[in-house]
């Protein structure tokens, strides 16, 4: 078939469609809504997915995180706990055992997560203080902005040094260079030796202003130094008295050499911890598993979205079929005339299919435009993250066009199969 | 001796109408030569419409043979029949059968569209014919804006555009008043004078006598073949 012929078919179709502008517009509406909802839904889904993936990725796919968890208490214990020291959670000995017994271990990071009032000159604010070992820098994939991170000698000699997050450096020191200055934590002085930023957070911050809030505001101090100064006992003022807790480590982060080793390492960990803890006073978080779960969730999410999208597209397709059937029966006489004057069956099929194609392509394009705008509006008004991907556009467009063509074939064939004599007699 | 354009040989046409088996033509033999002007007459249900449809390659014959311009068309496929209709046959209908959304020129061009003739060439030919039919000031009008006589002129122009070897007219004046009808018949006479082979269906005796030959059909058979001595070619 020559291109000239196609071009004339297109012009004929446009001409025929313009005879019934309202009808054509209403038919297109089905496709517009279909494509638009598919693109919008996929954008919202993809946005949510990216957000989750980022969060998990930051924990590191080769890491295993152990956390101290307060064990559940029996009812009769409740009365006495107020004035008793609750001792639970991960021990230094656990870290040592892990270091020797977990296979493919790359590094092990121990940490206490505390909360203190931090003071510099007259400024004071409450923030998280993390007492940890030097490996924490790599596990968290920090970016060193100034000075250095904690070193192993800091802990060995019990030096009162600290590294601070970039946000804290801005807010607490307000224009002063923090390096070499002392900040006070509940009366203990620590010398600032470095400033760190969070890699993933700083990257996101470049794209999205909203994330600036999450910038690093923590203080990092050597674990041994803290332990020597304060020990492992926490005393907290609560209603009706004091509550004391003894926790050696809040968190242990194990870094495994490669992703394949993570599952084996988790199994080994479970055994070690089970042997050494009477109660379930610890939790194991495996980001790799979370990533897998997130992927699985995403797959389900996509299936659900896909089905809804498919339904809306099929509805659009049925709309097209409906209209084309009406058009064909309305134009029976014309079909008869064209057949008598030499149109072959395939000319008639092509004529009606071309009309369907033009309706669905223009509907699809309009739908894509709305599908591009609506997620932007969603992000603007609700701050829900959306992500527009090329594949979402491509899928929505191709599917909608193919659905309409498939639904357009039946009316077109019906037109072509008419007996020309009968069609000519049609009033 | 002029060569035969239409040769029907023992043509039978049957069709099933629900449970009924209807024989519309029972072994018709007919020969129409080039340049002839023949009229088919008969009561309704006599088979004259069936005959016209078969002559126009709109339908397949059940048995026998049909040679159009010396070529058998009895066993052609649907596509091949379409091709024959577009290149060799010109139709003129009682109700004009123009396509409503197309203007005069576009209607005349329709057969050329399916032959893939280039647009400029088609437009040129269509304009010439429209002018010849006295439609020079109506070229871009839609059928709705034309009188019955003008519409039939458009239809005649359309039937002539591919220079057919056979022109078929089905009661071309049936929807027109006498005076306009006369003008159309005049046009057909002129076409005949130019050498066109014309077969017309009518039940008006007066009209029939303008032709050279009257073929009377009854009950699916040709019952009479009269040469009237009408206008000679």
Image (cartoon, helix red, strand yellow):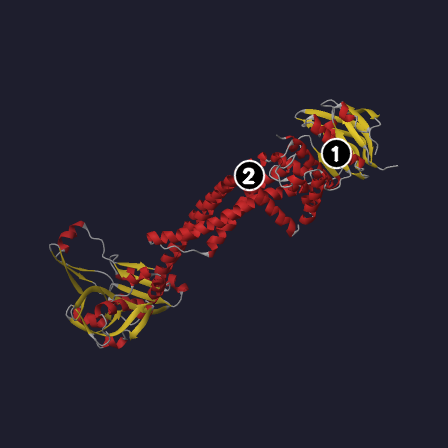
Q: Secondary structure at mark 2?
A: helix
- The residue tagged 1 is B187
Task: Say which of A293 and B81 sits in front.
Answer: B81
Q: Neighbour class for label 1 at 10 Å: few (<14), some, many (≥20)?
A: some
Query: Viewed as shown, does residue B118 lie left or right of B233?
Result: left
- Identify the residue shown where x is 76% and y is 38%: B75
Chain for disc number 2: A
Q: Secondary structure at mark 1?
A: helix
Image quarter of residue B66? top right
Q: So how many labels did they put on this image?
A: 2
Chain for disc number 1: B
Image quarter of residue A287? bottom left
CA gap, disc 1 and disc 2: 40 Å
- Report the residue that reaches farthest toward the left: A240
- The residue tagged 2 is A324
Residue B48, compared with residue A107, is above or below; it is above
Query: x, y (%) of residue B95?
Result: 66, 31
């Amino acid at each position: 078939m020559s291109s000239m012929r196609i071009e004339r078919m297109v012009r004929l179709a446009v001409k025929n469609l313009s005879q019934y502008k309202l009808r054509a517009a209403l038919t297109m509406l089905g496709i517009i809504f279909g494509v638009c909802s598919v693109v919008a839904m996929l954008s919202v889904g993809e946005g949510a997915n990216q957000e989750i993936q980022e969060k998990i990725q930051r924990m590191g796919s080769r890491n295993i995180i152990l956390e101290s968890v307060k064990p559940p208490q029996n009812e009769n214990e409740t009365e006495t706990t107020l004035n008793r020291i609750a001792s639970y959670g991960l021990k230094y000995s656990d870290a040592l055992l892990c270091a020797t017994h977990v296979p493919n271990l790359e590094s092990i990071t121990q940490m206490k997560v505390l909360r203190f009032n931090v003071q510099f000159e007259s400024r004071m604010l409450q923030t998280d203080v993390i007492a940890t070992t030097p490996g924490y820098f790599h596990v968290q994939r920090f970016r060193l902005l100034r000075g250095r991170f904690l070193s192993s000698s800091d802990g060995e000699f019990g030096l009162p040094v600290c590294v601070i997050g970039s946000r804290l450096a801005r807010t607490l020191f307000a224009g002063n260079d923090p390096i070499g200055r002392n900040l006070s934590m509940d009366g203990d002085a620590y010398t600032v030796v470095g400033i760190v930023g969070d890699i993933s957070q700083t990257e996101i911050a470049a794209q999205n202003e909203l994330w600036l809030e999450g910038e690093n505001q923590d203080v990092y101090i050597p674990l041994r130094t803290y332990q020597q100064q304060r020990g492992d006992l926490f005393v907290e003022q609560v209603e009706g008295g004091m509550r004391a807790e003894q926790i050696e480590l809040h968190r242990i982060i194990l870094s495994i050499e490669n992703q394949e080793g993570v599952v084996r390492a988790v199994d080994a960990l479970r055994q070690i911890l089970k042997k050494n803890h009477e109660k379930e006073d610890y939790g194991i978080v495996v980001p790799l598993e979370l990533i897998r779960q997130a992927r699985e969730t995403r797959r389900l999410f996509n299936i659900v979205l896909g089905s809804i999208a498919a339904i809306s597209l099929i509805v659009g397709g049925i709309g097209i079929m409906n209209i084309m059937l009406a058009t064909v029966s309305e134009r029976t006489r014309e079909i008869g005339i064209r057949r008598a004057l030499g149109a072959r069956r395939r000319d008639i099929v092509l004529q009606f299919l071309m009309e369907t194609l033009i309706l669905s392509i223009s509907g699809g394009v309009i739908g894509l435009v709305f599908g591009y705008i609506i997620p932007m509006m969603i992000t603007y008004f609700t701050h829900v993250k959306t992500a527009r991907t090329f594949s979402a556009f491509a899928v929505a467009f191709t599917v909608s066009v193919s659905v309409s063509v498939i639904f357009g074939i039946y009316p077109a064939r019906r037109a072509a199969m008419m007996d020309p004599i009968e069609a000519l007699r049609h009033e | 001796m002029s060569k035969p354009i239409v040769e029907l040989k023992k043509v039978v046409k049957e069709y099933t109408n629900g449970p009924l088996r209807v024989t519309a033509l029972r072994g018709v033999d007919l020969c129409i030569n080039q340049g002839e002007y023949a009229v088919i007459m008969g009561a309704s249900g006599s088979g004259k419409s069936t005959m016209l449809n078969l002559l126009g390659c709109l339908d397949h014959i059940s048995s026998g043979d049909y040679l159009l311009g010396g070529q058998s068309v009895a066993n052609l496929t649907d596509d091949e029949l379409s091709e024959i209709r577009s290149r060799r046959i010109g139709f003129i209908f009682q109700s004009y059968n123009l396509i409503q959304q197309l203007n005069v020129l576009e209607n005349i061009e329709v057969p050329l569209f399916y032959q893939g003739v280039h647009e400029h060439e088609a437009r040129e030919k269509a304009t010439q014919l429209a002018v010849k039919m006295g439609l020079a000031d109506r070229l871009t009008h839609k059928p709705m804006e034309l009188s019955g006589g003008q519409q039939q002129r458009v239809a005649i122009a359309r039937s002539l555009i591919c220079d057919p070897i056979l022109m078929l007219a089905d009661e071309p004046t049936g929807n027109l008043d006498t005076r306009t009808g006369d003008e159309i018949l005049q046009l057909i006479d002129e076409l005949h004078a130019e050498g066109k082979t014309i077969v017309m269906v009518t039940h008006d005796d007066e009209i029939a006598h303008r032709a050279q030959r009257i073929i009377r059909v009854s009950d699916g058979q040709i019952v009479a073949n009269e040469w009237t001595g009408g206008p000679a070619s």
